[in-house]
Image (tube, helix red, strand yellow):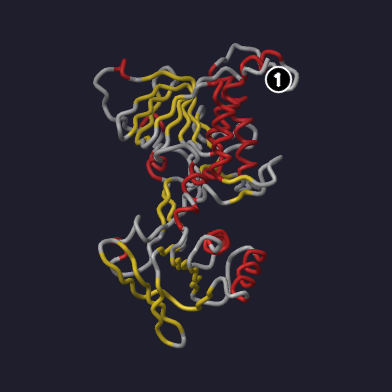
Amino acid sequence: MTISEVTTPSVKDEQNFVETDVAIIGAGPCGLFAVFELGLLDLKCHVVDILDRPGGQCAELYPEKPIYDVPALPIVTGQELTDRLLEQIKPFSPVFHFNERIDALSREPDGRFRLVSDGGIALLAKVVVIAAGGGSFTPKRPPLDGIADYEGSSVFYSVRRIETMRGHDIVIVGGGDSALDWTLNLQPVAKSLTLVHRRDEFRAAPHSVEKMRALVADGKVRLLIGQATKLEGADGKLASVTIKTSDGEESLPCTALLPFFGLTMKLGPVANWGLNLHENLIPVDTERFETSAPGIFAIGDINTYPGKLKLILSGFHEAALMAQAAQKIVYPNKKVVFQYTTSSSSLQKKLGVK
């Protein structure tokens, strides 16, 4: 299947389509920084995201979790990084469409792309940038009877605000980075905190494991080797969780259960757009970060190429090179003059700093 063969839902009036230079699918850090790089080159952007706010996985899964490998920011949370990026792109006035999933994409005879969302958003764009992270993601639900009755009130698969966990009897289940990170971050505010893992080995960063074991030794965190087998509570409010260990079963007080069993990533409608795919990732070149379809680019975790590193830093680099290539598509006859924001008066004027 090619891009031109993808079926687009009918729209009654062609004039209902909003025209833009670039349509960006995904409002995570890479999508937001792409707005900045494209804006410096006078390219206007519409940004579509299935979530209800910008930030992608950073804001959805770990808004208060510290990130240590963003250049010049020794420590920044997912939400702080999102807020700084939004501040940075203000001069370019991007248009956001939240709670929308692009279900169909096709190429027009004039070379532009027609995009239609599940909610009826209709765009005509000269360039499409896919910055959708790993696609849509859903947490893996542990096999516990009745767990759905407590989700959102006592069972949480992510923590948006640490303060909401204050004073709770918290049970965290898992042995990866998320489980260990939240054990460390929530211990100071919890009434009690128990970490449960099926074995006494962890897949998390060694320094996190060391810190966790120190808290256990100090009596501030309890570690149980076993599995959660039963939930008890009423009216959507959890009261206790039963843990099966080698010594038998134990019922723990629990008003907040955080299972971290990983995420199921789904590429979603992108898989039906006629792009070449490799293990649910989109191969791109490393000069333009263009996909197999001319005019469609992929940046961030959703793309793949030799030597790819899934880092926010890498996505920012990809956005910068993508923007240079996108300008040549939108303005094919315009001479490209590379400029630095530190010395270019025209760029500083665009940013509102001159």
Identify the residue at the far right of this view.
343
The structure residue drawn at horizontal position 41% and vertical position 18%, both measured from the top left corner, is: 19
Q: Nearer the viewer, residue 348 or 283?
A: 348
SS at mark 1 in the image: loop
Total labels drawn? 1
Q: Which residue is mark 1?
A: 338
Residue, far bottom: 247
Answer left or right for 251 relative to 41.
Answer: left
Left or right of residue 215, residue 343 in this image: right
Q: Amino acid at mark 1?
A: Phe
Identity of the residue drawn at 52% across and 63% down: 179
Decide: is 161 above or below 167: above
Residue at the spot x=70%, y=46% of the render?
A: 74
Quadrant location, the C terminus: top right
**Residue 315 lies in what quarter of the image?**
top right
Q: In the image, is residue 84 above or below residue 234? A: above
Q: Nearer the viewer, residue 128 or 70?
A: 70
Residue situated in front as seen by the camera: 205 or 24: 205
Residue 15 image-quadrant placement? top left
Image quadrant holding the N terminus, namely: top left
Residue 281 coordinates in the image, percent (x, y): 50, 46
Q: Residue at x 62, y 17 (%)?
A: 352
Above-or-below relation of 130 to 62: above
**Where in the figure is residue 338, as x and y percent of width and height?**
70, 20
